[in-house]
Image (cartoon, grey):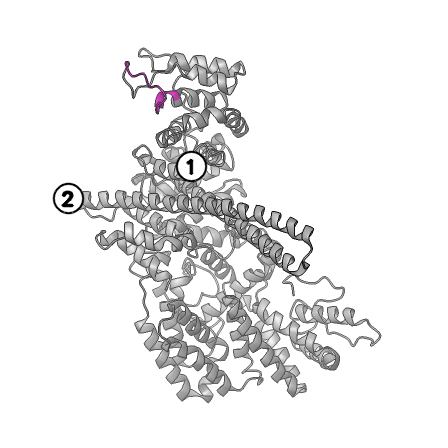
Amino acid sequence: MSRRRHSDEGDAGSQPHKRRRTSEPIEIEDRLESLICRVGEKSTSSLESNLEGLAGVLEADLPNYKGKILRILCAVARLLPEKLTVYTTLVGLLNARNYNFGGEFVEAMIRQLKETLKSNLYSEALYLVRFLSDLVNCHVIAAPSMVAMFENFVSVTQEEDIPQVRSDWYVYAVLSSLPWVGKELYEKKDVEMDRLFNQIEGYLKRRQKTHVPMLQVWTAEKPHPQEEVRVRPQSSSMTVTLPLSIVFYFKFVLFHVLVDAVCICKCVSVCCQGPVMPGSHSVERFVIEENLHCIIKSHWRERKTCAAQLLSYPGKNKIPLNYHIVEVIFGELFQLPSPPHIDVMYTALLIELCKLQPGSLPQVLAQATEMMYMRLDTMNTICIDRLINWFSHHLSNFQFRWSWDDWADCLTQDIEKPKPKFVKEVLEKCMRLSYHQRIVDIVPPSFSALIPANPVCSYKYEEETECPLPGLAMATTVSNAIKNRASNEEILIVLKDVPNPNQDDDDDEGDGFNPLKIEVFLQTLLHLAAKSFSHSFSALAKFHEVLKNLTDSDEGKLHILRVLYEFWRNHPQMISVLVDKLIRTQIVDCAAVANWIFSPEMAHDFTRFYVWEILHSTIRKMNKHVQKIQKELDEAKEKLEKQQNKKRDSGDEEDMEKNSEDEEGQLEEQIERLQEKVESAQSEQKNLFLVIFQRFIMLLTEHLVRCETSGVDINTTWYKNCIERLQQIFLMHHVIIQQYMGTLENLLFTAELDHHILAVYQQFCALQL
C-alpha cells in the first residue's frame, strides 16, 4: 500500500454509505482501501460518526473481503503512525461487533511485526508495537498479554554476547509505548510493571555509554538554562496522565537512551506567547514530537502536503505548535550520523511552512536561528555544517534579508572562533547562490572582514615584474600555442624546454618530476579558460593527455593540486568542481587529494567548509568506484551460474554444449579480470582511509605535544574542529570503515596512541556493538 493519499471522489472523511452488491470485486477493494486510508481527515462530520459508519461498512464486507481488510489495516498501522489512535479505535469497534476479527487482526499484526524485524525495518516495528499497546485501551488485547509481551522484550537485556543496540531497541520499544498504555497496565498489573521497571533500571545503569560523545549535538556540560525555566503554569498544555513511577522511568530512558541517538534541539519556548512547551524530558513533549516525526516520515516527499499536515496537528490550540514543528525539523536535520531524509528536504519544508504561516512561523524560525547562533561554541562541527547549508539556502529564498547587526558581537572575536567563522561560511555559501556584489550590498560595512574575497583568479605570469618569475617566457609561449590550437603532442614538445629546478644543469635526465613545467602549463591553461566552469572543463578535457603526462608521479599529482589551489584560492567553489573533474578524468587519484588537503600549504584553509566538502566527495567517489566494480563482478558470477544451470537442463546436444562451454570460458575470464579489479580498487580504498587517518593522527599529535610543551590548554578552537572532523569521517563512512577496522587497529589506532585521539576510535567501535 502506498503512503500517497487516494484521490477518490467524495468527502474525504464523510460517512461511508452501503455499496451496491453489483460492484466489481476490484472496485470494492479499492473503495475499501480509500475509505480506510482517508478516515480521520477533514470532514463535515465528526470523527466519531465517521468511524462508526466505516465500522458498519467494513463489518458488512468482512465475510467476502476479510483478508483484504486485514491487510489494509495492518498496512496503515505501519505506514500511517500519526493516525494510530484513529485506527486502533476502528479496530476496537470492529472487534466489538465481530469478536473473531479482533483475534485474527492481532495475529496478523504479530506476523507483520516479526517480518519487519527480520527485514530490519525497526522504525516500522516500533509503530506496530505502539499500535498493539493502544489496542489494550480498546479492549482488543488484554493487559496481562501486553505485560507478558513487554517482559519478553525486556528479557533480551539478559542475553549474553549480543550487540547493545539490540537491547536498546527492545527497551526503547517498551518505554516509548507507555504514553499510550502505561496507565492501563499499571492499574491492572502494578506488581509486574514495577518488576519490569526494576529490570530496565538495572540495564540502563550497566549500559555502555562510550559512544555518546560521538552522537552529541551539544557538548556543553551543563544543561541549557531553558530546561530549568518553568515560569508559567502549563494548565493549557496537552496532558498525558501516567502514574508517577512510569513518568520517572520514562524520563530516565529519555535522558539515557534517546539523547544518544536523536538530538533534540532545545531552542525555543521561554519567550513564546500563549501555551508553553512541555519540559525537554517530559512525556507530553515526547508524544507531540513523535507524532510530528511520524507526519514528516509519511509525507516528506511532498513538501506542501507535509507542511499542511504539520500545521493541522490535532490539539494545536493547546500547544505552541510552531515552536514544536521548528524544533522537530532541526532535531531531524541535526541527527547523527545522518538525517532521516536528504538535507534539502528540510529547507524546502521550512520555506513552505513560512509561506503558509507568514505572520508567525518566520519569527519562530528567526528566534530558533538566533538561539542556535548563541550556542555555536558548544555545537558539533558536523551540525554547524548542516546549519550553514540550511541557513544560506533559506536566505536565498527570502532575498538574503537578515538582521546582521544583531550578530555584530562576532566582529570582535578571532576569525577562527565559531561565530565569525559561521557568518563567513554562510556568506560564502550565499555567494554560491548569488554573486559577490550582491553579498557586499546586503551585509553592513562593518562585516567587511567576513565578506568572501572577490572570486577572481590569481595568474602569476600575468604581468612582468622587476624580478621576472621563472617560466614567465615559457608561459607566454605556451599561451600562444594554446591560442593557435596546438595539439597535445605539440604542447608536450614546447614544455620540454621548461627547465627543471629540481635538477642540476649537467643532469641529462629530464624526465623526472618538474614542478615548474606543471606550474607554467596549468597556470596558463586555467587562465585562458577562467571565464566559466564550462570553459575550464573543456580545457582539462582537451589537454587531458598533457596533464596525464605531467602527473605520472605522486609528486606530480600533488603539485597539480597545489597549482590549482594557488590559481583559484579566492574561488573555493571552482576549486571544488575542478578537483572533482581531475578525479573523474583520473588525472589525480583520491589518495593525492587526501595528501594535498593535509599538506602544510593547506593549513590556512584546513578548517574551512569547502575543504571538507572536497574530502568527503573524494571518499564517496572512491566508494562508488568499488561498488560499481563489485556489482559488475556479482552480475558476471550470476550470469555464469545461470549459464551452468541452463547447460545442465539442456541435455546432451553437442552443438549447444560446445557454445555453452565457449560462453562459460569467456565469463570465467571476465570474472577473473573483474576480481583483480575489485581487489585493486579495495586496496586503493583501504589506502585512502589509511592516508586520511594517518594525517589526522600526525596533526593532532603535533598539536598535543606542542600544547604540553608550552603548558597550554589543548582544547583550542582548532583542536575541537579537527577532532570533530575525525569523528565525521568515522560517522559518514562507517559502513566502509568497518571493513578495515582490523587494519586500522593494528597499524594506526594502537594502545600507544594518545588517549585523546584513541578515544574517537573507541567511540566508533562502541557504536558497532
Kindly identify which numbered label has been placed on residue 14: none
Residue beneath the point at 61% across and 73% down? 74
Secondary structure mostly taken by the magenta-highlighted segment of the chain: loop
Q: Give the residues in magenta.
A: 505-517
Q: Is residue 528 left or right of residue 759?
A: right
In this view, the residue farthest toward the right is: 22
Earlier along the polypeptide chain: callout 2 or callout 1?
1
Residue 280 visible, this angle: no
Residue topped by disc 1? 589
| Position in image of residue 539 (x %, y %) | 51, 25
* Distance of label 2 from label 1 (alpha carbons): 37 Å
Occupied quadrant, residue 522: top left
Q: Is residue 506 left or right of residue 285?
A: left
| Position in image of residue 650 (x %, y %) | 68, 58
Task: Characterize the local packing of mark 1: few (<14), some (14-19) or many (20 or more) Cα atoms within 10 angstroms.
Answer: some
The amino acid type found where label 2 is placed reads: Thr
The amino acid type found where label 1 is placed reads: Asp
Q: Nearer the viewer, residue 93 or 415?
A: 93
Helix, strand or loop status at disc 1: loop
Residue beneath the point at 67% across and 74% down? 46
Residue beneath the point at 54% across and 73% down? 113
| Position in image of residue 336 (x %, y %) | 42, 56
Marks 2, 1: nearer the viewer: 1
Helix, strand or loop status at disc 2: helix
Residue topped by disc 2? 709
Residue 513 falls inside the magenta stretch: yes
Q: How many marks?
A: 2
| Position in image of residue 357 (x %, y %) | 57, 54
